[in-house]
């Protein structure tokens, strides 16, 4: 492609609305243009990159035995009501009505649609296993679109769905997708790590996120400092502290005037927060939920919601509810004798002895409290992981970093097949629900993540496998006919080899051409200049300070050598 014919406008200044390196560079390099908040048009150069990423995804998905399909993005509400997600998905769903007042949504994801497809197409176990995938635009009305395409209201996703006759078959399909994702991100030159994750609105059991460490990441990811353990903070667990056992002492109700907070109670009784259990009260769909955790810990609300299951509305209890179920003012709640539908007890409480809790009486606390003797509840992991906690696998220290989710894989099980009647006839003649898996990759988010990891002060540094063009050729003096002719000769030879090449034939200063080439991120730059008289041209790899003088007759071989490395 000759740059004089391209629709490409680069920008020197940082656009006002941009925040992150990828957002800034995608606008400055002319890859995309903003249409509205969280909505972007992709320009020719940006679309080429997206297609390169899509092709890598297609190749690996096809190699894994998946088949491509394409579903509608306009989805009828009936399917979502069958699965029970029409209300659960919440305000992120774009909803609309047609002229006949029939309800639709713009597809935020496609579990319901694919389940509808297979329940009409799959009859027998002989048609299983099956993996279908598509690459399509999704729509979510994000409350706060930000960071360009990292969190947008319209995005391109590769979503795949597996169908098996057993959980063992699901494990095989899940592992195939896990391996395919690993290869995809390796080929995109993204440094990412799979992490255990919460399944969220998708439902099911068992999921992993492929996370890119980044300071702009909106997810917090917990990593072990030694082993391979990694998990989203919503899912992460720790090895509970093992406290020395103590003889259970007599339960005592003690006066604690004006001591409401953990800090105040600890100071009044001269104990550390590790010796106090705090009681938090929530409302989940109108039911009271009491959570008991160690005084120095923070509650993980996602874990609470998952433990209860099927919650539409979840929030901290208002003061009047707290007063009603504790018969006390705020600050004196405790699990002993409290009136509620659920009591959830963090498993760390089981390792505490003779601790302190609120007495459900204004101005009083209990001391020498012990789980099992004085109160009980549903035991589980309900706390946030903190830096320095111990890995649940190996016991070493955990660290916490921000991350960008570029891929997510789920074991859905029968959540959708049972609710929507997607059954098959098994070998024994019985009717059984399909066992499903779901696997997503954010294509434009992957593009932005590559830039986040591959850029410098001059612009993007595209890996050769992703770059919109592999080579840019620049004639230093556009009015020098010999330089221009040599540039065009090299350009023609490289194109004949199947290499995508830019010929910068614009009537601009060489410095401007160099800056644009660096900003756009073209991996290889060939410059025809003064050394042409010596039979040499300049060869430079983007991101390297080294400039090679290469024999004109060998320049094509030098380019080919770089391509053999990918």
Image: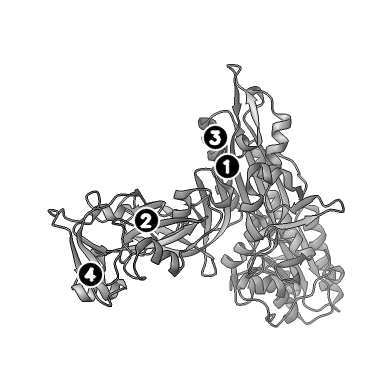
CB atoms at circles 3 and 1 under 8 Å apart?
no
Q: Which residue is mark 4?
A: 272
What residue did someone put label 1 on? 177
- Tell me how far mark 2 sits from mark 4, CA to CA: 28 Å
Compute the Cα span from label 3 to label 1. 11 Å
Front disc: 1 or 2: 2
Q: Which residue is mark 2?
A: 339
> Which residue is denoted by mark 3 in the rendering?
170
Q: Does label 1 or label 2 sit earlier along the sequence?
A: 1
Instruction: Give the number of the mark in front: 3 or 4.
Output: 4
Mark 1 or mark 4: name the one nearer the start of the chain. Answer: 1
Seen at 60% across and 34% down, the residue is 418
- In depth, the one of 440 and 115 nearer the eye is 115
Is 114 displayed left or right of 266 in the figure? right
Mark closest to the chain's N terminus, 3 or 1: 3
Identify the secondary structure beneath mark 4: loop
Q: What SS does tag 2 mark?
A: loop
Comparing labels 3 and 1, the label whose residue is closer to the camera: 3
In the picture, residue 438 is in which quadrant? top right
């Amino acid at each position: 492609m000759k740059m004089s014919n391209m629709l490409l406008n680069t920008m020197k200044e940082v656009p006002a609305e941009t925040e992150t390196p990828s957002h800034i560079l995608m606008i400055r390099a002319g890859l995309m243009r903003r249409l509205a908040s969280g909505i972007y048009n992709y320009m020719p150069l940006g679309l080429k990159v997206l297609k390169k990423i899509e092709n890598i995804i297609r190749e690996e998905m096809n190699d894994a035995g998946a088949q491509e399909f394409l579903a509608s993005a306009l989805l009828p509400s009936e399917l979502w009501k069958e699965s029970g997600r029409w209300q659960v998905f919440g305000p992120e769903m774009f909803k609309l009505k047609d002229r006949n007042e029939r309800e639709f949504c713009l597809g935020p994801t496609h579990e319901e649609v694919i389940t509808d497809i297979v329940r009409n197409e799959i009859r027998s176990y002989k048609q299983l296993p099956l993996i279908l995938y598509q690459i399509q635009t999704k729509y979510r009305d994000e409350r706060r679109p930000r960071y360009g395409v990292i969190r947008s209201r319209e995005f391109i996703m590769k979503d795949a769905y597996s169908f098996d006759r057993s959980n063992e078959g699901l494990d095989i399909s899940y592992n195939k997708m896990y391996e395919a994702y690993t290869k995809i991100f390796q080929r995109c030159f993204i440094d990412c790590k799979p992490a255990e994750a919460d399944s969220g609105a998708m439902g099911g059991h068992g999921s992993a996120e492929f996370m890119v460490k980044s300071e702009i990441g909106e997810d917090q990811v917990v990593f072990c400092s030694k082993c391979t353990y990694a998990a989203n903070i919503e899912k992460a667990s720790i090895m509970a502290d093992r406290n020395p056992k103590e003889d259970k002492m007599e339960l005592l109700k003690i006066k604690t005037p004006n001591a409401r907070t953990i800090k105040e109670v600890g100071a009044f009784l001269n104990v550390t927060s590790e010796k106090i259990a705090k009681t938090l009260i929530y409302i989940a769909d109108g039911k009271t939920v009491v959570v008991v955790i160690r005084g120095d810990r923070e509650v993980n609300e996602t874990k609470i919601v998952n433990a209860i299951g099927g919650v539409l509305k979840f929030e901290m209890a208002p003061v009047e509810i707290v007063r009603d179920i504790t018969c006390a003012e705020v600050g004196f709640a405790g699990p002993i004798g409290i009136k509620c539908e659920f009591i959830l007890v963090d498993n760390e409480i089981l390792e505490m002895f003779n601790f302190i809790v609120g007495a459900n009486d204004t101005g009083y606390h209990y001391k020498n409290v012990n789980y099992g003797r004085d109160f009980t509840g549903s035991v589980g992991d309900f706390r946030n992981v903190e830096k320095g906690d111990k890995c649940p696998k190996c016991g070493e220290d955990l660290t916490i970093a921000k991350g960008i989710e570029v891929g997510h894989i789920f074991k859905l099980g029968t959540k959708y097949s049972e609710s929507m009647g997607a059954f098959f006839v098994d070998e024994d003649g019985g009717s059984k629900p399909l066992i499903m898996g779901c696997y997503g990759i954010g294509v434009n988010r992957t593009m932005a993540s590559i830039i986040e990891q591959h850029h410098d002060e001059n612009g993007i540094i595209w890996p050769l496998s992703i770059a919109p063009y592999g080579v840019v050729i620049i004639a230093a003096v556009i009015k020098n006919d010999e330089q221009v002719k040599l540039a065009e000769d090299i350009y023609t030879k490289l194109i004949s080899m199947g290499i995508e090449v830019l010929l910068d034939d614009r009537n601009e200063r060489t410095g401007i051409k160099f800056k644009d080439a660096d900003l756009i991120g073209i991996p290889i730059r060939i410059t025809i200049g003064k050394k042409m008289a010596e039979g040499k041209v300049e060869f430079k790899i983007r991101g390297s300070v080294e400039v090679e003088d290469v024999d004109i007759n060998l320049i094509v071989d030098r380019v080919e050598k770089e391509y053999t490395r990918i």
